[in-house]
Amino acid sequence: MKYWAGLLILMLTQPIRAEGELLVVVSRESRVDSLTKSQVVDLFMGRYVNFPNGDKAKVFDLAPKSEMKGQFYRRLVNRTEAQIDAYWARLLFSGRNTPPKETESPGQLIDEIISSSHAIGYISSQDLIDSLKVVYRFEAL
């Protein structure tokens, strides 16, 4: 009986995760149909400024301290947001590249992606709409 009571308490005290699957998306109008994880890393970490097909990429990110941003970079490169900020500070200081453009909300990020066939960003599967095309899905944990 103590076992079941302990299990019930443990289940009730765990946070409920309802975000959905993490997706990398482009506009439905984009000529990009899919990307590998390595290609997503290269785009979001500023190693490449073009999609594999040669089209210019316009990378969008969420605002600092958003839960989804932290989750994205942990899943993408196994780094914290602070580590990502330090990485971009070094690149900015050396003049090699600039970080992705930040948006204030998933809704604003979606609007930016829809408005450009060259835009790329990440969203929760719950935010997926017909105007977007999924180019990469993170594997389930």
Image (spheres, grey):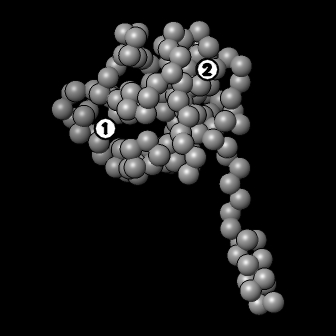
- Given residues 84 and 51, the one toward you in this image is 51
**Residue drawn 59% across the image and 9% down it:** 29
- Given residues 126 and 137, the one toward you in this image is 137
Q: Residues within 10 Å of mark 2 (few under 14, many from 20)?
A: many
- Residue type at mark 2? Lys
Tag 1 residue: 88
**Residue drawn 68% across the image and 68% down it:** 14
- Given residues 93 and 25, the one toward you in this image is 25
- Residue type at mark 1? Trp
Q: CA distance from mark 2 to mark 1?
A: 27 Å
The quarter of the image holding the N terminus is bottom right
Tag 2 residue: 133
Tell me the element at label 2.
strand
Q: Is residue 88 left or right of residue 96?
A: right
Q: Is residue 46 above or below residue 76?
A: above
User: Is residue 31 in view from this perspective?
Assistant: yes
- Given residues 83 and 131, the one toward you in this image is 131
**Residue drawn 53% across the image and 39% down it:** 138
